[in-house]
Every structure is written in structure tokens, then in C-alpha cells.
Amino acid sequence: MAIDKVTLTGIRVFGYHGVFDHEKKNGQEFIVDVDISYKTNKAIDTDNLKYTIDYAEVALLVKTIIEGESRNLIETVAEDIANQIMKKFDIKTVKVTLHKPNAPVDIDLRDISVSVERLK
């Protein structure tokens, strides 16, 4: 039994998450990475999309959540993404890293991110 992985890196979506009023009003770009571990045997044997992870569907799910309901914490958003992916696909594990490169901090830094990993 193989457990393989599909990875989506750098999904860029504009959203309105954060604890400050200006974040909720003006919004900002979020970047999401998703690693999904799953059994590929049947997909490989049949060469059929219905037995694998449709990464376009994953990207659309991420986009919908980031553009959706405003949350205070990126941890909450990352958790929602992970849970929705687990619900939609027959997978073993998912890891979601949510980047907030324009986080309102008073120091020069390249990125702030949070990662959540969920196992079935």
C-alpha cells in the first residue's frame, strides 16, 4: 500500500482575516500551502482522476474559505481549511500552512505563518 502526497504551494487569495479593524476592512493577501497524503494505488492502476485528489478542487476550496467569513486568527482559518479537505476527500493526513506576509507587526520580516496537520 502506497501513501503518497500531493502538494499545492503558494495559493494566493485576498481575504479579510485578523484581529484589527483595518485588517477586516482593507483585507490583505494570504498564501496557503497544502500537503495531502493519500493512497494512490487505485489512481495509478486506473489512471483515472476520480481515484486521486483533484488539486483544482482543493485550490478552489482554499479560495472559498479565505474569501469567506472573516476570522480573527489565521489558526482558525487554517483549521477550517484542513477540516474541509478531510471531509471532502478520502485522505490519511493533511497539512495546511497559512502565510500572512503582510501581518501588522512593527518589525521588518518576510512572513508569518501557522501550520496545522490533521490525521485520520
Image (cartoon, grey):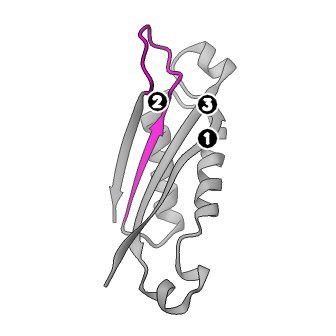
Which disc, if any, is residue 29?
3
- Judge whether 49 appears above or below 119 on screen: below
**Quarter holding the C terminus?**
bottom left
Q: The residue under label 3 is which amino acid type?
A: Glu
Q: Which residues are magenta?
A: 93-111
Q: Quick check: marks 3 and 2 in contact, CB under 8 Å?
A: no
Q: What residue do we see at 66% from left, 47% from top?
A: 64
**Secondary-structure class at tag 1:** strand
Q: CA distance from mark 3 to mark 2?
A: 14 Å
- Reading the image, the residue beneath label 2 is 73
Q: Residues within 10 Å of mark 2 (few under 14, many from 20)?
A: few
**Percent of width and height locating residue 16:** 63, 28
Which disc, if any, is residue 119?
none
Q: The residue under label 2 is which amino acid type?
A: Leu
Q: Magenta span has 94? A: yes
Q: What residue do we see at 63% from left, 62% from top?
A: 57
Q: CA distance from mark 3 to mark 1?
A: 7 Å
- Between 9 and 16, the one lying in front of the other is 9
**Secondary-structure class at tag 3:** strand
Q: The residue under label 1 is which amino acid type?
A: Arg
Q: Magenta residues: mostly which secondary structure?
A: loop
Q: Which circle's residue, 2 or 1, is located before the other in the chain?
A: 1
Q: CA distance from mark 2 to mark 1?
A: 18 Å
- Judge whether 95 appears above or below 109 on screen: below
Which disc, if any, is residue 12?
1
**Percent of width and height locating residue 112:** 42, 28
**Secondary-structure class at tag 2:** loop
